[in-house]
Each structure stands twice: as C-alpha cells, then as structure tokens.
C-alpha cells in the first residue's frame, strides 16, 4: 500500500490522469464501450432518473428561450454522484442554432473578453465576426493557411471576467451579463431545484478536433452552494467526471450538442476534464440536421430568433468540426462582496492541471487551464 502511494507521488500519475490519457490516445483509438450515453434514455446500474421541478418554469417561459416544456426533459444522475444532473438535449428542434450564433457572433464582441485580446489590440479584436465571415463563407479552412479570428477563438468570458493568471474574479473587471443567457440559465437552474440561481460569470470554451480541456476543479467562485451549469453545442465530446481527489477514477460520458449538465451539492467541486472531441462524419451534425430556425412558431416575446441564411451557413460550417461549451457560474453568495483587494488571500502553491501542465495536487483556487489544441 505504502509502496503504491510512493510510486504515485513519484510518477505524478493518478487515476484521473491515466483515464484522461487513455481517451486522448489517437493510435490505437481507445475502447469507448465504457462511455455512458445518456441520449439513449436507458437506465443502468449507474444511471438513475432525476425528478425535475416541472412547476418551476411555465411552458411559455421555457419556450421563449428555445427549450421544450420541462415535463419533456430527460434528466439523469449517477448513483454515486449526488448533485450531478445530466439533461439530454432539452432544446426545441431548430433552437440550438440561435445559441450557437450567440456563442460565435455575439458573445465574442466587446465588452466581453476573449483569448485574442491577450495578444491583439482592441481595434484588431473589434468585429471578430464581420472580419471572419467573408472568408468563412467562401473557403473551407482546409484550403487556407490563415485562420480567421472566429476560428482562432479559444475562450470568451462574460460578466465577472475570470482572470486566467490570478485564477480569480474581481469586482473591478465586470461587464453586463447577456440577458438572454441569464434567462436561459435561470430557467434550467429553477427546474433543477435552484430557483435563486443567478449567473454572474460565464466561460465559453471553443474546441476543435484536437482540443482538450485539462483536469480541473471550478472553485474560484466565492460561494459553492450555487450550481455550475454547462451547455454544449456542436460536435460531441468525451467528458470525464471524477471525485474530490485525483486518485478517484472518473466516469466517462458522451456530451452531445444541446446537452446540459449541472454540478451542484456534493458534485460541485468534483474534478472534471474533456480529453477528446469526437468529430462526426460530414452531414451527421445534429444541429445541422435541425436547420437554422425553430420549427414551431415563435411567440412575440421569444428571445430566440431565426438566423439569417448567411449566419446559419457560417455557424453550420463551424460546428461541422468544432464544439462550443458554455459554463455559467454564480460567483458571490447572498450579500457577499469580493475580499478587499488590498488584503489578498494567501494562495497555496500549485498551478494549472491538465494534459500539458501537470501541477501540484493541492486544492488552491480554481485549477483549470483553457482549451488546449495540439498544433498539427
Ligand atoms: O467543455 C466542457 O464540457 C467543460 C468545460 C469546463 O469544465 C469549464 O469550463 O470549466
């Protein structure tokens, strides 16, 4: 026993990392037979159904944001993961397209912050969409050397902007949170039993065929009693959900377009990661099949709107090989303020953890790296 512990410390290996590497391996491809698939709707010895609060949000309210009535949602949990909820694509047919467009066209705009701002001037990162569309419309990425700004997006932050260096949010770096995304997340949280959830920060991660997101815990938010919501669009991913320490082996599951995940209670601070993106053969992207607008008539008060043909053509081309994930976080508890920045809280050592940067295993702040894409 003591010998095993010593060897784990020596090699830095842990159960989570081993699993991460297994699913990341390209040659030979891993065996996917253990990956849980919530889209089949089947229960198993691990998957259990979750009762949602069907009365928390009316049909009219959920329809406005492009969701189906809560009674139609298929929600599951895992036996040993209390507080974890997986909702298998609760969106109405055609409505994911609107959210994909928001993620590609609207949310990367100023005053939101994106990875390109880290090394480009504000004028260069102005109108990312408008600068990219003429190229994206006409020529597929494989036929060109230079990537457009939209293709170079890796992350966008909303609301309280997460600082990747300090691994903290701060009172003085905040911009208004997108109201339609606020509404969407409030409705999802309310149906899952969190009627007071109010998202204050968002992180969008943009993944391509070779991208991964390292092993991390989201703990920079100052109040962990609120859930963490995650929405996925575009290509599928393998998502790994572990325990409270890296020695706990994670459970692998498919995360497909439209899927929603909630991490709350005992599952709020679990380790998780995305080792692999699974690019579907052409023509099989679910959102693409759905088309560019809701198939049902929209209410006058709907926040979801049909896309122009041009916007849809560009979004469609993007998600044929890429994935976007949005996580929504409430940062502060009721009546809570950020600590006085003149008295910073001491940090324990430890850095980002992931495939490319394996830090110490101490639980300091929110340990995560942004999406890594292996350069080919
Ligand atoms: O892309 C995902 O599914 C996970 C994103 C995530 O874990 C994060 O942003 O902290």
Image: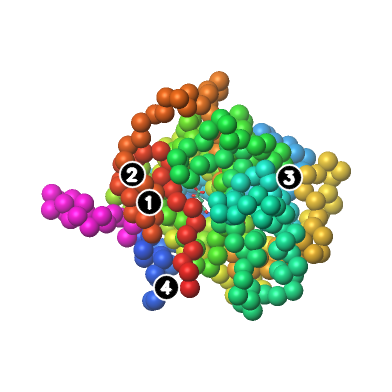
Which residue position is annotated with label 3?
A: 65
Q: CA distance from mark 3 to mark 1?
A: 35 Å
Horizontal arrangement in the rendering, residue 128 relative to residue 224 (left or right): right
Q: Which residue is mark 1?
A: 353
Gap in angstroms between the C-alphas marked 3 and 2: 40 Å
Mark 3 and ligand 1: say if the CB distance to the nearest ligand atom is below 8 Å: no
Residue at x-position 53% and y-position 68%:
209
Cβ–Cβ under 8 Å for marks 1 and 4: no
Q: Is residue 188 visible?
A: no
Residue 292 in the figure: left or right of residue 173: right
Residue 283: x and y, percent? 66, 74
> Could you say which is closer to the camera, residue 122 or residue 249?
122
| Between marks 2 and 1 in the image, the one whose residue lies nearer the viewer | 2
Look at the numbered disc 4 and give the secondary structure of its residue. loop
Question: In the image, which residues are magenta?
Answer: 1-18
Q: Are marks 2 and 1 in contact (CB under 8 Å)?
A: yes
Q: Secondary structure at mark 2?
A: loop
Considering only order in the chain, which callout, 1 or 3, is on the residue closer to the N terminus? 3
Residue wearing tag 4? 26
> Helix, strand or loop at disc 1?
loop
In the rendered image, which quarter is residue 22 located in?
A: bottom left
Mark closer to the chain start, 1 or 4:
4
User: Which SS class for mark 3?
Assistant: loop
Q: Considering only order in the chain, which callout, 2 or 4, is on the residue closer to the N terminus?
A: 4
Question: Is 182 placed left or right of 202 in the picture?
Answer: right
**Distance between the Cα atoms at labels 1 and 4?**
21 Å
Q: Looking at the image, is mark 1 or mark 4 nearer the viewer?
A: 1
Q: Is residue 82 above or below residue 25?
A: above
Magenta stretch mostly in which secondary structure?
Answer: helix
Disc 3 vs disc 1: Cβ atoms closer than 8 Å? no
Q: Are marks 4 and 3 in contact (CB under 8 Å)?
A: no
């Amino acid at each position: 026993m003591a010998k095993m512990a010593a060897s784990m410390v020596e090699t830095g290996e842990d159960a989570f990392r081993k699993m991460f590497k297994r699913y990341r391996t390209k040659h030979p491809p891993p065996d996917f037979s253990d990956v849980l698939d919530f889209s089949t709707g089947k229960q198993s010895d691990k998957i259990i159904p979750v009762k949602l609060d069907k009365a928390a949000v009316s049909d009219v309210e959920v329809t406005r944001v492009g969701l189906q009535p809560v009674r139609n949602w298929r929600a599951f949990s895992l036996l040993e993961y209390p507080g974890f909820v997986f909702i298998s694509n609760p969106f109405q047919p055609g409505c994911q397209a609107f959210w994909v467009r928001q993620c590609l066209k609207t949310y990367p705009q100023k005053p939101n912050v994106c990875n390109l701002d880290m090394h480009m001037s504000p004028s260069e990162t102005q109108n990312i969409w408008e600068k990219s569309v003429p190229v994206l419309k006409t020529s597929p990425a494989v036929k060109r050397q230079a990537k457009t700004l939209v293709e170079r997006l890796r992350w966008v932050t909303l609301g309280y902007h997460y600082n990747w260096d300090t691994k903290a949010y701060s009172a003085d770096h905040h911009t208004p949170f997108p109201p339609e995304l606020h509404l969407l997340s409030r409705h999802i949280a309310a149906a899952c039993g969190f009627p007071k959830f109010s998202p204050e920060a968002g992180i969008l991660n943009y993944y391509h065929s070779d991208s991964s997101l390292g092993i991390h815990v989201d703990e920079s938010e100052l109040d962990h009693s609120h859930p963490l919501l995650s929405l996925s669009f575009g290509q599928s991913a393998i998502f790994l959900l572990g325990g409270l320490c890296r020695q706990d082996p994670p459970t692998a599951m498919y995360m497909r377009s439209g899927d929603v995940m909630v991490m709350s209670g005992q599952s709020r601070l679990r380790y998780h990661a995305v080792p692999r993106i699974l690019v579907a053969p052409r023509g099989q992207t679910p959102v693409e099949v759905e088309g560019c607008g809701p198939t049902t008539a929209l209410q006058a008060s709907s926040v979801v709107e049909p896309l122009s043909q041009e916007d849809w053509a560009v979004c469609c081309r993007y998600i044929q090989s890429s994935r976007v994930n949005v996580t929504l976080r409430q940062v502060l508890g009721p009546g809570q303020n950020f600590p006085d920045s003149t008295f910073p809280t001491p940090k324990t050592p430890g850095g980002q953890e992931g495939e490319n940067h394996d830090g110490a295993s101490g639980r300091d702040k929110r340990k995560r790296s942004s999406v890594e894409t292996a350069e080919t």
